[in-house]
Amino acid sequence: RSALVGRCTVTEKKVDGLAGSKFCEGLTQRIELLSLMIYCASLDVEITTTSKKAWDALLSVFNASTSPCDKLIRRLLFLYEKHTSFPVQMNELRWGQTNVKYSSDNVSSNGTSHDWDWFVDSIDLGRVRSTLSQFPVSDTLKPISLVGIDSCGKIPVHSIHLSLDNEDDYGNGSDNESRDYDQRTRSNELQRVNEWPTENDVGGWRGPGEDPRYSPGFILPLILATMETFLPMAVASKYEREKHENELSAPDESFNAKNEADNVQHIEFCQTCRRLYSNGAISLAVASLSSQCPSLRKVALSICGLFLESLQMQKSSSLKDWRERPQLEMLMSSIQRGLSVRRSIRIKKLQGSSGGAALRYDGDVTSKLNVPMVPAFSAVFLAKALLILSRPADDMYGQMNRYFLRLTHFHGAFQDFFGLPGFLSLYCSSADELMRCKSERNWALQSLIDGAVDEFSFRIIARHHVPELIMSSVGSQIDSPGKKGEMLIAIDALRTLIERGGPSAISHMVMRQGLLSWLHGIVNWRKVFALFPFDDMKCKFLRLIVAAVKSHRSHTSTPDDGQKHPSISAFYEGVPLADVVIRIFLDSKVNTDTDVNVSINGYQTELYELTCDALWEVYLTTPQKIMGNRCSECHGMTTLDDMTSVLEKFATHKQMCARVLAALCALPLASSSARDDDSANTFCDIALGFILSKLPTTSSDLVAICLRRILDLIQNHGILASDPNFSSRFMKTRTLATKLEDGVTVWNEIFKL
C-alpha cells in the first residue's frame, strides 16, 4: 500500500488525462483514470496534500451532475477531504465553465458574501427543469463507495446514508408508506452494496445526450451555505436561541432592523433568496423532500425554512418588483403547515397506543428532526408550482393559484403529500375552452411522467387507479384524429410507469390489468395507418411494447424460489403481439420502396431497431420455442408473405438480421396457400444465405430453429425440393446439423423431401 502513496496524489498531469477519448468496451479514459485514483485514495494510507491548481483543473471537468464521471469525482473529493486537509473551501467548488469564468486569481476567498456570487449565477434553470423531469431520488448527501472501484470492495457500514448507525433517523415522523419504503430501500442498499449503475438502472438518465441533471447531494449544501452566508446576524442569533425547540417557527413579522447595517443585511439576504429562486434552486430543494437520503431531506427543509424567512421579512415586502412574493409565501407556508400537521397527527395517533414507540421517539431531541420522505409526484408537483407562480403568463398559473387558495383546513396546510395533488382534477378537466382542456390534460400527464421515478411513487399512483384511467382514455380517443398528440403523451406515461414502477408496476399493469392484451387489442382490428399516421407515433408504441414484454419476462422468469414455472410464465399474447409489430413495421413509409437497399435515417432507423427489439423480446419471453413439428401444430396470425417481407428488409442489416430471423422462424404461421410458394422459396434462401455467411460464428440455436422452419415449409411447399440453388446451400449445413441435438434427424428429414 505504501507504494501507492504517490499514485494517490492528484497532480495537474494526471488531471490532464481526464479529457481522454473513448476507451475499450464503451468506457472512457476519464472513467478509468478516476476509478484508479479513487481506488488509491480509498486505501488506508497517508495521502499527500495536493495543490489547489490541480483541484481547480479537476473541477473544470466536473459538471455537478449525476452522470457516472461526476459521481466518481464527487467520491474522489469526499475521500481527499476525509483523509487530508482539503485545499479547496466550500465556496471555491466552482465547476465546469464557472471555474474558468470565476478563477481563483480573480475571486478572493475571505469568507465574505461576495464569494458566493459565482454559485448563484451558475445555477441553470434549464438544468433544474431537467432534474425535476427525472428527479434522482437515490442521490445522497455523502457520496458512497462503489463496488469494484473502492479498495474495500464493499461499502463500510458507516459510509452508507441508510446505515444501521442512523437507524433511529429512519421513519421518524413519516407515514407508514414512506417509513416502510425507507426501511426496504436500506435493506436493498445493504444487499446490492450500491453496485455500479447499469444501462437499465431505474434512476439513470433516460433522455438524449449526457445526463444534465444536478446532483442534489452536491448542490443543496451549497445553496444552504449561500443562504446562511447572507443570513442577517439578528436572524441567525434568533435561530440559535430557538434551536433547542427544533421547530420551524414562523418569524416575527414585527421585527425591525436596529441600525442601517442590519437593513443592508436584510436586503442582501432577500435579494439573494430571490436570485436563488429565480434560478430554480428553491424548486430543487422542494423536490429533494422526496430523496431517499434522510440527511439530504433535512438540508432541503432547512433551505425551505430560510426561504420562507426571507419571504416574511418586512424588507422583502418593500421590494416592489418582487410581485410574486405573496403567492410564493402562500405556497411555502402551506408546505410548512402541511408537514407540521402531518407530524402532529401522526404523533397524536400513535402516542396513546404505543407511547411513541412506533415513531422510535424515546425523548431524544434529535429524533424529532426527521423529515418524512414525500413521494416524488407530490414533491415535483410543489416544485413545479413554485416555478409557475412566478410567471403569470404561464398557462397553468390560474390553476396553480386557485389550487392553493382553496386550501382552508389548518390555515391552508398542504395535506396531499401522499396523494396525487391536482392530477385528477386536471386530467378530467371540465374547462369550457377546448384548448384549455387539452393543455390541462397534457400537463397532468407530463406531471405523471415526471413524478413516477420509483416503486414508491407508483404505488401511490396505482392506488388512485391512474393506469386504468389512462388505458381507458387512450382506447376511447385512439380513433379521434385530433387526439393524437395527447395519445402520444399517454403512451409515454404508460411506458414510464412500467419502466420505473418496479415489481409493483409489472404485477399491477401486466398481470392484473392485462396491458399486453390491451396493446394488441387496440391495433388488432384497426388500420395501422389510421392509428399511427407518423413514424414517431409507431416508434412510441413499439417502445411501449418492448417495455411491457421485457417486464413480463423479468417478472415470470425468476419467481421467489428462483425457479421458472411454466404455469405462471404462460405468454399467450406473444403471437398477436408479434403480428402487431410486423403490421406496424410493414406499414412504415420506408417499406413502400421496393429497393431493399434503401438507406434509412431518423425515425426510420429507430423503427428498424425497435421492431427488431420487439420481435426479439417476444421470442425470448415465449416459454417454449417452436420445437420439432410444433410450428405446424400452432396457428399463427402472420402470413408467410409478411414474414418474408420483413426478412427482406432486414437482410441488409446484419447486426439485426440474426435476431429477426430467429424470432420469425419461431413464430407460428397463418394458414398457407398456394401463392405462398414464392415467399417460402425467398424465406428459405435468405435464411440459408445468412447462416452460411456467418458460418464460423453462427449460433447453434439459430441453426436449429431455421432448420425446423425449413422442414415445415418444405412439407407444405414441395416446390422447394426441386430448386438446385436451395439444394446446394442446404447440403453445406450438414456439418452444423451434426453439432445439434436431433440436428441430424431434422436434416435427414429435409434431405428425404
Image (cartoon, rainbow, N blue to C red):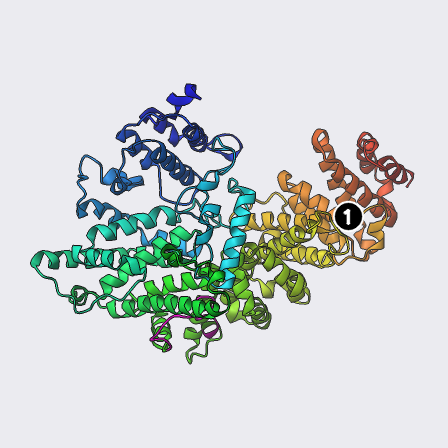
Q: Residue at x 68, y 49 (%)?
A: 558
Which residue is disc 1 drawn over?
A: 625
Q: Residue at x 67, y 65 (%)?
A: 521
Q: Position of residue 269 (x, y in %)?
A: 19, 56
Q: Position of residue 111 (x, y in %)?
A: 19, 43
Looking at the image, residue 471 lies above or below residue 609: below
The outermost residue toward the left is 260
Which quarter of the figure is the N terminus placed in? top left
The quadrant where residue 752 appears: top right
Can residue 268 be seen in the rendering of this structure?
no
Q: Main secondary structure of the magenta part?
A: loop
The quadrant where residue 638 appears: bottom right
Number of callouts: 1
Element on which disc 1 rests: loop
**Drawn side of residue 346 relative to residue 672, left or right:** left
The quadrant where residue 91 appears: top left
Q: Residue at x 21, y 48 (%)?
A: 117
Looking at the image, residue 15 lies above or below residue 581: above
The outermost residue toward the right is 752
Q: Nearer the viewer, residue 566 or 577?
A: 566
**Is residue 679 magenta-colored?**
no
Q: Position of residue 723 (x, y in %)?
A: 83, 40
Q: Read off the magenta span.
A: 409-425
**Is residue 417 magenta-colored?**
yes
**Drawn side of residue 667 relative to residue 427, left or right:** right
Looking at the image, residue 487 lies above or below residue 592: below
**Drawn side of residue 461 relative to residue 713, left or right:** left
Q: Position of residue 209 (x, y in %)?
A: 44, 45
Kind of residue sitting beneath label 1: Lys
Q: Nearer the viewer, residue 377 or 583?
A: 377
